Image: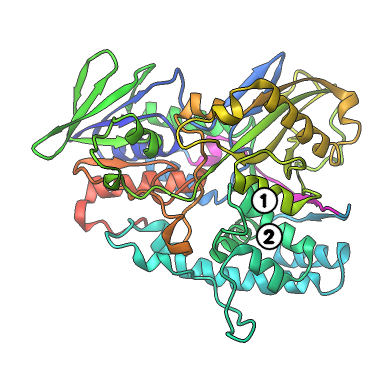
Amino acid sequence: MARIAVIGAGMGAMAAAARLAVAGHRVAVYERAATYGGAVGRFERDGFAFDTGPGLLHLPAVQRDLFVKTGKEPLEQCVELVPVDPASRHVFADGTGVSLPNASRAGVVSALDEALEAGAGERWGEFLGRARDAWDRSRRPLLEEPLPADPSPFERDPYPAQGRGFLRRGARTLAEVGAWELRDPRLAALLEGHALSYGLDPRTAPASAAVFAYMEQTFGSWYVRGGIRALADALYERCLARKVEFTFEAEVTDVLEKAGRACGIELAGGQRVEADFVVAGAPVPALYRDQVVHWERQDEWPRMQSAARTGRVTVCLALRGARPGDAVHRTVVHTTDRDGELDALAAGRLCDRPTVTVLRPDDASLRPDDAHEAITVTATVPAGGAWSSENLWGAGAQAGAFADRMVEAAARAVPELRDRLLWREVRTPADTFRETGAYRVPAPALAGADGAWLPAANRSPLPGLYFAGGWSHPGGGLAHAGMSGALVAGLIVEGDDFRGSQ
């Protein structure tokens, strides 16, 4: 039985902790905040409650596997999973709207043909076929196996090339896929919206980012009754049931080394904890920035999604008046100035007309009574400087003005929004930093773009230290963080013989 110290109580770290405890190890988690969950937070006021991190669950098979492997009660006995149908409604720049059914390719094709034009659904369906090819080529090696010591094969894009022009060059970016293959600005906006929601600029994101659309429309969108925070609650309870120990408000300031390998951690008060293995669930950039993991030259840092430069603004809206029975759970209101939004994102400034995602869950536990409604509105924004976002988020007036523009966009999906508004809470990348240690939000691992979207490997450069969570392989998002926990547990339990999740 090994002693394992876990830094942080985020979703990836807790997934690793639960699996390692089941394998017979003694696991202790040290979290600098007062609670667990990392980016999966919750804001409550006046009987309203809001998810401050992700609001929907994709690839639920990852969470189902975690709960099956760590206890007798399956996921559905611990939380109530509700399929979201329609999966989303999209309001495009020209005012056209379309509602897309959940996990139904034929239904999506039909909806697009009816809402846009004959042939639009067929083009989207053909694109999904190519996205499936990219998924099939990369799923196992990129998501379910440890990142190899030589990741250069992932620098090549798995999206199948569709020859164009004199040189017959295929699309290299997601924006080129939309322009060349979909040939409709609304279909292109639908595609690019998936990348933007993960914090990627479609003009620089590799064509392989097409897998985001395939994943969602193939495996569906799910809501956890009580909010995604309820999933964090269930995972925490599962860890406790497996005898994982938690210490909150315990900041780890140093990973201890002995004979060239990790041998424990040191806390802010000077207390030292010995361990045979250390699992770091905190953001990898923060670990190196704060010298928790020692380094002398920046080229000693592991790969950690060098292209990730964005964060999120979330506006929590408390509304008077009942939620209409025909309200859609998720509506994406696309910008009316696509180039302006992407130019601003690339330049590190706030745009005038953001794309926003409006979530309106039909969940009585999130509102004081049925005469009120709780809504969240999110937008992807520049995170700010390399280590600080004071240039964007230090002044409340700037954040408030941007939130005004977000609410204005959301009003296209929620009639009489301003008349119904009781109050709002604005959360920026500065809040993300306070709660997680990073302003930026990592994206899922992607092949292509010369490896710019590959996260840190789960094996760190220091033997005995492993990375779990969104900044480590296979990247950000609830499902991918869960995969990282499975990979770390496999590497510790099986060692060099581990070849990937089953």
Q: Is residue 135 left or right of residue 196?
A: left
Mark 2 neighbour class, 10 Å CA radius: few under 14, some 14 to 19, many 20 or more: many
User: Any magenta on residue 85?
Assistant: yes
Front residue of this view, candidates 441 and 449 = 449
Residue farthest to the bottom, as pictured: 166
Q: Which quarter shows the N terminus?
A: top left
- Kindly indicate whether the residue at mark 1 contacts the one at mark 2 (C-beta within 8 angstroms): no
Which residue is identified by label 1? 342
Chain part drawn in magenta: 74-93
Q: Nearer the viewer, mark 2 or mark 1?
A: 1
Report the Cα–Cα distance between label 2 and label 1. 14 Å
Q: Is residue 76 left or right of residue 283?
A: right
Residue at x 72% of width, y 54% of height: 339
Element assignment for label 2: helix
Which residue is identified by label 2? 191
Q: Is residue 95 left or right of residue 153?
A: right
- In percent of width and height, residue 373 lies at 79, 26
Dividing the picture into quadrants, the one containing residue 220 is: bottom right
| Colour setup of the view | rainbow
- In percent of width and height, residue 65 lies at 44, 48
Residue at x 41% of width, y 41% of height: 469
Amino acid type, label 1: Leu
- In percent of width and height, residue 22 lies at 30, 38
